[in-house]
Image (cartoon, grey):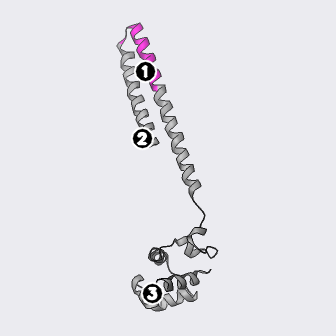
Amino acid sequence: MKFEEKLIQLRKARGLSQEALAEQLGVSRQAISRWELGETTPDLAKLKQLSELYGVSTDYLLHDEYTSDEDLPKVKETTQTFRSKEIARSYIFFGLALLWLLIGLVNILFGCIAGTDVLIWCSLFHFFNAGVCGFVAYRSKR
């Protein structure tokens, strides 16, 4: 179904005249008529208004091969890809947190054996970084 046919069908299904539709969109009745005859097309702002008014997507309006919104391709794969990247990122931060904890424990061990305060202070720094990485990993999983 062509764009102009969809416009006519949607307008009539809502019981709107060209004048009433033109008033709602802030255009002339002649503009509506030219759209429905296929002489011109609405600008992007008016196209968006039409899709909101009729409760259909702009993809449905613009693609002749779509007969309803159900014909539109699904975007679920994109969402799944994005989610898997988030999970991978959280595992990286979780791994970093474990690495910082391990380094902190090694510093404490050597600091106690050598009796130096510097390594103990370094270990506190590593524990702080582990906490930050763990927090980021936790937040990115949510």
What amino acid is labelled 1 in the image? Gly
Question: Horizontal and vertical percent for residue 29?
Answer: 45, 91
Magenta segment, principal secondary structure? helix
Circle 3: element type: loop
SS category of the residue bearing label 2: helix
Residue at 40% x, 35% y: name it.
Answer: 135
Residue 6, above or below 119 = below
- Of the two numbered discs 2 and 1 in the rendering, the one whose residue sits closer to the viewer: 2
Res. 77 image quadrant: bottom right
Q: Which residues are magenta?
A: 100-116
Discs 2/3, front: 3
Choose the circle earlier in sequence order: 2 or 1: 1
Q: Amino acid at mark 2?
A: Arg
Q: Amino acid at mark 3?
A: Leu
Q: Does the stretch in magenta take in 57? A: no
Relative height, residue 86 to residue 6 (above, below): above
Q: Are marks 1 and 3 in contact (CB under 8 Å)?
A: no
Residue at mark 3: 16
Image coordinates of residue 88 in percent, x first then y, are: 54, 40
Q: Image quadrant for the C terminus?
A: top left
Q: Which residue is mark 2?
A: 139
Q: Earlier in the sequence, mark 2 or mark 3?
A: 3
Q: Could you tell whether 27 is left or right of 59 in the image?
A: left
Q: Earlier in the sequence, mark 1 or mark 3?
A: 3
The disc label shown at residue 104, or none: 1
Callout 2: 10 Å neighbours few (<14), some, many (20+)?
few
